Image (cartoon, grey):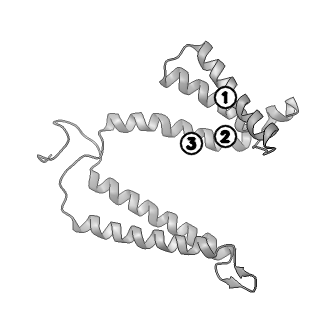
Amino acid sequence: MSEHSSGVGQRGPSHRWTEFGVAVFCILFGAITIIGSVKAGSGWGPEGPKAGFFPFYIGVIIVLASVVNCIEILMQSDDGQLFADWGQLRQVMCVVIPTTIYTLSIPYLGIYLASVILIALFMKWLGKYPWTKAAAVALGTPFAIYLFFEKWFLIPLPKGPLEDLLGL
């Protein structure tokens, strides 16, 4: 470990390789955007731009900027700085993984049931709140969102089998 590292004995991914990984991810994201926009029509039609016109150029900009970032990262010398230690990354993953599961479960459970589960687990597991507070907030927040979006602004949100059973 070099003298620039963030602490003695700490281990984790380096700042340089983390930046490089993010840049590569952005290249892939831009490429997917370009491919999708070409499929949707990225040209100019008789009525104006087709559906993929603007996303195509946004994807090109993302890819070009990320390639420049990759080149700059590879041209710099590695100073040995840590991006984060493994303990810090574990804390981040404690939020990222449940949030990803929440997002993936919305089409199957509906947004309200998935939100109740996520809020209750986060409050109990990460916040160490008592079950009564966690249950109150977990049930109250989706109810407020339901009133706000579905009743007042008439914007339907994804529903699951529970909402169908309740006739919502």
Q: Viewer-proximal residue, 137 or 121?
A: 137
Circle 1 sits in a helix, a strand or a loop, which is it? helix
* Crowd tier of the residue under label 1, counting other residues whose Cα lies within 10 Å: few below 14, some 14–19, many 20 or above: some
Q: Secondary structure at mark 3?
A: helix
Q: Which mark is residue 100?
A: 3
Hey, which quadrant is residue 132 in on the image?
A: top right
Q: Residue at x 67, y 34 (%)?
A: 114
Q: CA distance from mark 3 to mark 1?
A: 19 Å
Q: Amino acid at mark 3?
A: Thr
Residue at 40%, 33% in the rendered image:
91
Q: Give coordinates of residue 74: x percent, y percent.
A: 26, 66
**Which picture quadrant has residue 86?**
top left
The numbered mark, 3 or 2, whose residue comes first in the sequence reads: 3
Query: Which residue is tagged 2?
Result: 105
Q: Residue at x 60, y 31 (%)?
A: 118
Q: Gap between marks 3 and 2, in whole Å?
A: 9 Å
Depicted 126 relative to depicted 5: above or below:
above
Amino acid bearing label 2 = Ser
Q: Badge 2: how crowded within 10 Å, few (<14), some, or many (20+)?
A: some
Q: Residue 127, which numbered label?
A: none
Q: Which residue is mark 1?
A: 141
Q: Quadrant of the C terminus?
A: top right
Residue 161, image quadrant = top right
